[in-house]
């Protein structure tokens, strides 16, 4: 570890060993999560005119080994950025303080390091579905010390290893761009067209709402500094305003979305021409940030090409300029915290690539942009680039627009932008949460509802025409305890390219099926398929999009997990949560409701085994029996799915699960911090058979690390109690930090790599098996004709 100049007095270096042990060891394994100690050392050396340095200094070593951030998970500070992030040659957790002022500075650095935790709460995005030369993963991160953000471009080699050295960091690149050169758009409350985000454009509007918000300080008092605020938000430094370490704000929950050339493969005769026209367009990575903007960055260079300021965030923009932002007097808040959705869609004028986005906790609204051609991105083209916004001013049943967009892994497009049975393309979303907030546009019902927003419905500047959008009300909720519909999963049941049904859950545990089969939207309806309740009959909230795959007996298996991670009170909630797979036997719009747990096969977590330093879950292997009677209806004795209760206290599902071949893939989380934006907590990656929640026929994980998956990746365990061990494929792998929805990428015919962005700020690369075959049609491609 070190070089002792006073041999044989090696005992003087024990402090470094103790600090190292405390940093990498779970000191209280009897508690949930990982309890370790990050040590900071201030070396005064007051009597030494020639102090020991580097590996000859025990406190230097203690700071290095006791405070490094183990980004690659090998328990070694073998990467410089793990212990020397500022590249000054000194450990980040060590300060040589030989004078009083240096001692004060060292203490300040120690406390700042405690406060400033870099983390990630958003899933990663890739530029490819297979590991090929040039594969890249894009990861968003945030720093809770100063609420700055990063978007990193990281190479992935052919083995699936993610580089620790980024090609670029958009947070660095944006600081080199002059404020006047940036293309930043917003929306006009006069015309509802796009306009430049400049003071002259905003101040010239007859509706003064946006100007008035900008002319107020963080406490809401008018101060006439609207012009200065726009300059600041565009990237200028303004005297008296907040000092930023980067012009890019924190990116917390927004998942980056990579948009390359059109490749959805629609068979509409005009799509091929559209794809050919834009085959060489500049690839862009889009992501929302809590600096008030959606950003679009050049995927090759990290240069910002476009930004957009949505209307609903204006009322809080002045907080970003306050010198105390992020402190208790002006606490951090969310702005454009939602993930962008992008898909090719056909308008009456032809095909476009459309970006739509929500705000999560940043506001009550969705927006849509035309991002077909990055060569046209300019403030002069603002009116044609901004398509519309839909807010609670248009419909009061819209709440805070929490949405986790599921991806169509075949088309690489957002599943929520699709063609409906009336021939129109639409954005399909739930209404989000807290729609009864007293903001002048409060819901009078508090119900959970589904919105189908036709893409051309708001392009005329309003949503008042009867054909602009459709709202399907579940009828469940109240203004006192408002319900909310989570992200829906649309399904094309007959392969004609039109969405026929959709599934979505709500805060009261209801799983809804929406019948969208009719060509007349007035006939679209919804019915309850199932209500998730724990063993004590308490409803379990559903806040993610379900997975939907065809069932071999007809209909669909609908997979989802329960749990909520939206507000501060959720941090300490230990209500039991569950993984579910529900058989919807009706392939069309009909519903045969599932009465409850008694119709489901129970699976359980039997034990956790620690092998090669990895905690692995072993679960039961019960079978489900599905059957229909002679008339084709579900037999009374048939199972209707399965469930598995999550065993860890506070464990829940808050990120979208995904379906891969014959398996449902869940990520769970267990928060262990009082700060929802800190990097604490852990989770599990769970992979289960989609039909009955049992173990997979082959191990999913390469926990031996030999770059192959075989019987050596099974675990010996006496599951049946006969005294003899059997080899069992594990179904869960513990993640040291909170994992987000995996981004899968094919490695070869038998394996794939799942890239998982974690709350610690690193990207985990998990080598996994693929299913040896498929049962029924597990995925489908939309085929759209003329």
Image: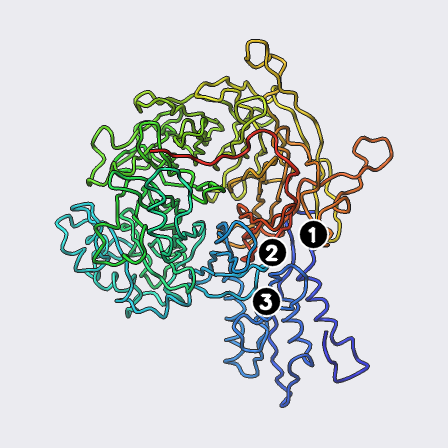
Say which element carries label 2.
Answer: loop
Foreground tag (1 vs 2): 2
Task: Say if 688 sits above or below 231 in the image.
Answer: above
| Cβ–Cβ under 8 Å for marks 3 and 2 | no
**Other residues around mark 3 within 10 Å, as few (<14) / some (14–19) / many (≥20):** many
Where does the image place residue 86, in percent across and percent down from the top left?
52, 72
Distance, label 3 to label 2, CA atoms, is: 21 Å
Left or right: 146 as drawn, with respect to 371: right
Work out whether residue 404 or residue 57 is closer to the camera in this orientation and state it.
Answer: 404
Left or right: 120 as drawn, with respect to 418: right
Label 1 belongs to which residue? 28
Label total for image = 3
Question: Could you tell which of marks 1 and 2 lies nearer the N-terminus?
Answer: 1
Label 3 belongs to which residue? 82
Task: Say if 276 sits above or below 453 in the image.
Answer: below
**Other residues around mark 2 within 10 Å, as few (<14) / some (14–19) / many (≥20):** many
Where does the image place residue 163, in percent across and percent down from the top left?
57, 63
Distance, label 3 to label 1, CA atoms, is: 24 Å
Question: Could you tell which of marks 3 and 2 lies nearer the N-terminus?
Answer: 3
Left or right: 396 as drawn, with respect to 475: left
- Outermost residue to the bottom: 49
Colour pattern of the rendering: rainbow
Label 2 belongs to which residue? 160
Foreground tag (3 vs 1): 3
Where does the image place residue 343, in percent across and percent down from the top left?
38, 44
Distance, label 1 to label 2, CA atoms, is: 33 Å
Question: Could you tell which of marks 3 and 1 lies nearer the N-terminus?
Answer: 1
- Outermost residue to the right: 723
Say which element carries label 3.
Answer: helix
**Other residues around mark 1 within 10 Å, as few (<14) / some (14–19) / many (≥20):** few
Tell me the quadrant of the picture where the C terminus can be found.
Answer: top left
């Amino acid at each position: 570890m070190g070089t002792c100049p006073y041999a044989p007095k090696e005992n003087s270096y024990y402090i470094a060993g103790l600090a190292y042990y405390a940093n990498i060891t779970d000191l209280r394994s009897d508690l949930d999560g990982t309890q370790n100690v990050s040590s900071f050392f201030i070396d005064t050396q007051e009597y030494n005119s020639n102090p020991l340095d580097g590996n000859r200094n025990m406190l230097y070593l203690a700071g290095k080994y006791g405070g490094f951030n183990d980004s690659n998970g090998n328990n070694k500070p073998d990467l410089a950025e793990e212990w020397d992030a500022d590249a000054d040659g000194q450990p980040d957790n060590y300060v040589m303080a030989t004078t009083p002022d240096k001692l004060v500075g060292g203490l300040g650095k120690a406390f700042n390091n405690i406060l400033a935790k870099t983390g990630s709460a958003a899933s990663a995005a890739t530029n490819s579905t297979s590991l090929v030369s040039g594969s890249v993963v894009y990861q968003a991160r945030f720093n809770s010390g100063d609420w700055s953000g990063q978007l990193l471009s990281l190479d992935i080699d052919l083995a699936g290893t993610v580089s620790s050295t980024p090609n670029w960091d958009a947070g660095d690149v944006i600081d080199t761009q002059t404020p006047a050169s940036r293309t930043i758009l917003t929306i006009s409350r006069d015309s509802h067209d796009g306009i430049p985000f400049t003071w002259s454009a905003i101040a010239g509007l007859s509706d003064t709402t946006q100007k008035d918000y900008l002319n107020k300080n963080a406490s809401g008092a008018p101060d006439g500094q609207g012009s200065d605020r726009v300059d600041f938000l565009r990237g200028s430094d303004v005297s008296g305003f907040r000092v930023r370490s980067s012009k890019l704000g924190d990116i917390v929950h927004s998942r980056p979305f990579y948009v390359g050339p059109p490749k959805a493969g629609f068979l509409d005769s005009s799509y091929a021409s559209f794809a050919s026209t834009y085959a060489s367009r500049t690839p862009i990575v889009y992501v929302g940030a809590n600096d008030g903007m959606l950003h679009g960055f050049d995927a090759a260079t990290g240069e910002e090409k476009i930004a957009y300021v949505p209307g609903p965030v204006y009322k809080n923009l002045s907080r970003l300029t306050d010198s105390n932002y992020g402190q208790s007097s002006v606490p951090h808040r969310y702005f454009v915290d939602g993930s962008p959705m992008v898909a090719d869609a056909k308008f009456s004028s032809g095909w476009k690539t459309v970006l739509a986005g929500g705000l999560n906790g940043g506001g009550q609204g969705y927006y849509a942009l035309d991002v077909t051609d990055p060569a046209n991105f300019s403030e002069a083209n603002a009116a044609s680039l901004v398509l519309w916004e839909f807010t609670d001013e248009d419909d009061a049943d819209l709440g805070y627009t929490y949405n986790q967009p599921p991806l169509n892994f075949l088309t690489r497009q957002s599943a929520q932008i699709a063609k409906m049975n009336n021939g129109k393309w639409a954005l399909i979303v739930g209404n989000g949460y807290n729609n009864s907030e007293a903001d002048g546009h409060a819901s009078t019902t508090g119900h959970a509802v589904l919105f189908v927003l036709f893409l051309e419905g708001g392009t005329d500047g309003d949503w008042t025409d009867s054909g602009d959008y459709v709202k399907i009300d579940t009828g469940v909720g109240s203004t006192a305890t408002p319900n909310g519909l989570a992200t829906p999963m649309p399904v094309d049941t007959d392969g004609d390219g039109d969405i026929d049904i959709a599934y979505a859950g709500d805060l009261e545990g209801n799983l809804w099926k929406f019948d969208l089969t009719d060509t007349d939207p007035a006939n679209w309806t919804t019915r309850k398929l199932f209500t998730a309740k724990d063993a004590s009959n308490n409803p379990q909230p559903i806040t993610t999009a379900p997975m939907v795959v065809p069932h071999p007996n007809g209909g669909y298996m609908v997979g989802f997990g329960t749990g909520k991670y939206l507000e501060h009170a959720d941090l300490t909630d230990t209500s039991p949560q569950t993984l579910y797979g529900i058989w919807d036997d009706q392939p069309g719009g009909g519903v045969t409701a599932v009465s409850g747990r008694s119709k489901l096969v129970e699976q359980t977590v039997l034990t956790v085994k620690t092998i090669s330093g990895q905690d692995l879950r072993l679960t039961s292997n019960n079978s489900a029996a599905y059957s229909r009677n002679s008339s084709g209806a579900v037999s009374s004795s048939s199972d209707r799915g399965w469930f598995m209760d999550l065993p860890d206290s506070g464990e829940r599902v808050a990120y979208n699960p995904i379906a891969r071949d014959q398996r449902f893939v869940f990520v769970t989380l267990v928060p262990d911090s009082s700060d929802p934006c800190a990097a604490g907590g852990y989770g599990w990656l769970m992979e289960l058979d989609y039909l009955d929640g049992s173990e997979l026929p082959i191990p999913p994980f390469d926990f031996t690390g030999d770059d192959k998956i075989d019987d050596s990746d099974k675990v010996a365990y006496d599951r049946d109690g006969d005294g003899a061990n059997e080899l069992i494929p594990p179904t869960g792998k513990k993640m040291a930090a909170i994992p987000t929805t995996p981004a899968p990428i094919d490695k070869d015919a038998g394996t794939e790599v799942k890239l998982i962005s974690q709350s610690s700020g690193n990207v985990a690369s998990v080598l996994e098996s693929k299913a040896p075959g498929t049962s029924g049609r597990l995925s489908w491609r939309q085929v759209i004709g003329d």
